[in-house]
Amino acid sequence: MNNVNSNRDLNGQRVILLGASSGIGLATAKAAAAEQAQVVIVSGNEQRIQAALQQLPEGSEGYAVDLSREENIRSFFGTIGAFDHLVYTAGENLVLNTMNQTEINDARRFMDIRFWGAFTAVKYGAPLIRQGGSINLIGGTASARPGKGWGVAAAICGAMEGLVRALAVELAPVRVNSIMPGIVDTQLWKGLPEADKEALFATYNRTLPTGRVGLAEDIALGYLYLMKQQYGTGRNLVIDGGGVLI
């Protein structure tokens, strides 16, 4: 019989969360800390890191790291030591533009944080993950149900789906998964004019099978599951209020 670790809680495990000074990342850090995990949060803004640490238990760690630069990510993992789970939720605020409105350099910056930042974090973080640990990334449902102006977002989400499957094979037995959130009410939408955001959310509140847009805490529960379960890998878990069904 295979020797399977039956300990499926996070008590005493070390979780490193990149992009965790707000939104989904911070909600996941709080949820993991509530299960007695040792959390380490990382983001590009020192002030936001310090504010986030005020919402986490004593002993939590926080570091300001520019996740758009490989050398900074390499340096961070060069000093952080061994850990159990990596969660990457970093990303720039969304801006929805049609192709003819899109500046290519702006599109590249979105890819730098959301895709290449995750890729780089896995490159340098994976060798430090203890037996039974996991890597948990973030994508989105835009690749499956894009709307007008979602070209860059859909491309990033599609790239992340493929990356997760490939890394699950390459890095086995470390489990590699992602969550594909639908519309979630976080700071991610600050780039939209307030009226546009309100109209978008109102539409989804009317049409989603769940009757509401998501909260960061909804997605955090998904990350807890991915860290605690021990058999699923290469999966892109959709948590979207039923959005891909409509």
Image (cartoon, grey):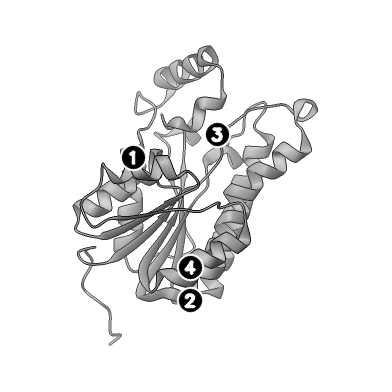
| Residue 175 left/right relative to 114 | left
Q: Element type at marker 1?
A: helix
Viewer-side residue, 212 vs 192: 192
Cα distance between the residues tagged 3 and 1: 19 Å
Cα distance between the residues tagged 4 and 2: 10 Å
* Residue density around tag 2, few if under 14, some if 14–19, many if 20 or more, within 10 Å: few
Q: Sequence-wise, which precedes: disc 1 or disc 4?
A: 1
Cα distance between the residues tagged 2 and 1: 30 Å
Q: Sequence-wise, which precedes: disc 4 or disc 3?
A: 4
Coordinates of residue 35 in the picture (x, y in percent): 20, 56
Would you say the residues marked 3 and 1 are in contact, meaning their CB atoms lie under 8 Å apart? no
Q: Sequence-wise, which precedes: disc 2 or disc 3?
A: 3
Which residue is denoted by mark 2 in the rendering?
Answer: 127
Question: Looking at the image, can residue 74 be seen?
Answer: yes
Q: Amino acid at mark 3?
A: Asn
Question: Looking at the image, can residue 21 be seen?
Answer: no
Q: What quarter of the picture does the N terminus occupy?
A: bottom left
Residue beneath the point at 26% across and 42% down: 55
Cα distance between the residues tagged 1 and 4: 23 Å
Coordinates of residue 196 in the picture (x, y in percent): 54, 15
164 is higher (above) or lower (below) than 126: above
Which residue is denoted by mark 1 in the rendering?
Answer: 51
Q: Which mark is residue 167?
A: none
Coordinates of residue 37 in the picture (x, y in percent): 24, 60
Residue beneath the point at 54% across and 72% down: 169
* Residue density around tag 1, few if under 14, some if 14–19, many if 20 or more, within 10 Å: few
Q: Tell which tag, 4 or 2, sits nearer the viewer.
A: 4
The image quadrant that residue 240 belongs to is top left
Residue beneath the point at 38% across and 74% down: 82
